[in-house]
Image (cartoon, rainbow, N blue to C red):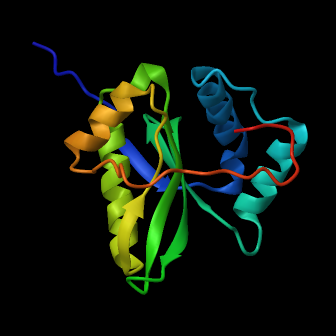
Amino acid sequence: MNDVVTPAISIRPALKDDAKEIIRLIVELADFEKLDPPDEDARRRLIEDAFGPDPPFRVLLAELGGKAVGYAFYLFTYSSFHAKKTLYLEDIYISADHRRHGIGKIFMEKLKEIAKENDCHRMEWVVLDWNQNAIDFYEKLGARHLNEWKTYRLIIGGRSEH
């Protein structure tokens, strides 16, 4: 009988050298959400912002057998009521071929660890109302939907509504 070896999943901070893979995954996410992907200017700004001297957000990259298969963009906001930071998860995405292998759970554990290290009171994110798989995943982790809050958006320049 032969042993089956499964490549290890690793979650690590993204590096500037990962830029092409990050963009590839963002384009995959846009396709999944049926949205236009970022244009060339947005892609350039994203990479400059992510890896500049004072990045407004951070990126974690998931690798399986050395191949980038997912990412999480996060940043910190602040709760005036708790007087503590909040880890805000802007985006989490895992390539379709690599879902249901525990990568999302590993991402969320890593993000919880980062939140604790940064003395955050909570983590928050939004999910599309039609993405039932994601909703089920988050609820299984113990996250709760905040019915009493509505998300609002005001576009300040730019080309799209998303």
Where's the C terminus, which quadrant? top right
- Residue 60, image x, y percentages: 52, 53
The residue at the far left in this view is: 1
The residue at the far bottom in this view is: 83
As drawn, is 24 to the left or to the right of 156?
A: left
Q: Is residue 99 visible?
A: no
As drawn, is 40 to the left or to the right of 95?
A: right
Viewer-nearest residue: 127 or 19: 127
Task: Work out whether 81 lies above or below 64.
Answer: below
- Residue 124, image x, y percentages: 42, 58
Task: Please tell me in which quadrant of the rendered image residue 59 appears.
Answer: bottom right
Please tell me which residue is depicted at 77% across the width and 67% down the height of the picture. 52
As drawn, is 157 to the left or to the right of 108?
A: right
As drawn, is 19 to the left or to the right of 123?
A: right
- Residue 149, image x, y percentages: 44, 55
Task: Please tell me in which quadrant of the rendered image residue 29 appears.
Answer: top right
Please tell me which residue is depicted at 38% across the width and 83% down the height of the picture. 82
Viewer-nearest residue: 2 or 56: 56
- Residue 102, image x, y percentages: 28, 36
Q: Is residue 16 visible?
A: yes
Task: Work out whether 52 lies above or below 65.
Answer: below
Please tell me which residue is depicted at 66% across the width and 46% down the height of the picture. 18
Q: How many marks?
A: 0
